[in-house]
Image (spheres, helix red, strand yellow):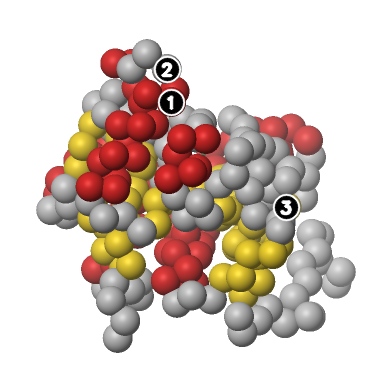
Amino acid sequence: MPSKLRLGALASGGGTNLQSIIDRCGDGTLNAEIVLVVSNNPQAGALDRARKAGIPCLCIDHREFADREEFDRAVVAALQEAGVELVVLAGFMRIISGVFLEAFPERIMNIHPALLPAFPGLHVQRKALEYGARFAGCTVHLVDGGVDTGPIIIQAVIAVLDDDTEESLSARILQQEHRIYPRAIQLFAEGRLRIEGRRVRIEPPLCPAEAVLTNPPLE
Ligand code: GAR
């Protein structure tokens, strides 16, 4: 068994994605360990989850820094100190600066609750509903200099139902987030991601050519 991938997790909110990663590390599905959790929000539920799991955690409050770069330098220093190999953004509501990207090139992942490149940014479940999309979903991607623009590793697709509300749709998307984020991290841990420009190849390939969904179904 190769040594465990050392993860640093950044979270601003409740931390259910963080919890899914903690749980998959715990049951051995994920050959990784979270060595540090950082939140910019002192009230983040993610910090409670880390404490409960016995994972070292820090609050680095962005409001105490003069600018984005200075905040990022403090976060990067903490992650490097902990020997982090891959940074996972788990509901981290801050834009990452060049300082961060240079410290962890192609080593920062993010989860986003939409099928990118549709609906980057905020309130995206509502936007998908308002647009009338028949599918919604979530995306794990590598972070680059843009907002939700980096190379895509994995996506999960769910059908939008006629009686969906923003809440019901968000809840079903979140269930899939909890499945795909650990999977993306495990593929990284296994060295199976080849980044070629915008495209990420999975080696060996996993998806059958017949994989198709329609909504409504054809029959
Ligand atoms: C998740 O839905 C995640 O995809 C989203 O915030 C939520 C965090 O939930 N992230 C973004 O919108 C990032 N742009 P959690 O704290 O329960 O994991």
Image coordinates of residue 38 in percent, x first then y, are 28, 39
Q: Considering the numbered disc 1 on the image, is that residue within a helix, a strand or a loop?
A: helix
Who is closer to the viewer here, 46 or 203? Answer: 203
Q: Which of the image's four quarters has the C terminus? A: bottom right
The residue tagged 2 is 67
Comes first in the chain, label 2 or label 3: 2
Q: Residue at x 50, y 51 (%)?
A: 105
Who is closer to the viewer here, 116 or 194? Answer: 194
86 sits to left or right of 77: right
Image coordinates of residue 200 in percent, x first then y, are 65, 65
The residue tagged 3 is 135
| Residue 190 sits above or below residue 131 on the image | below
**CA–CA distance between discs 3 and 1?**
37 Å
Q: Residue at x 72, y 82 (%)?
A: 208
The residue tagged 1 is 69
Badge 1: residue crowd in 10 Å (few <14, some 14–19, many ≥20) = some
Can residue 24 be seen at all in this image of the molecule? no
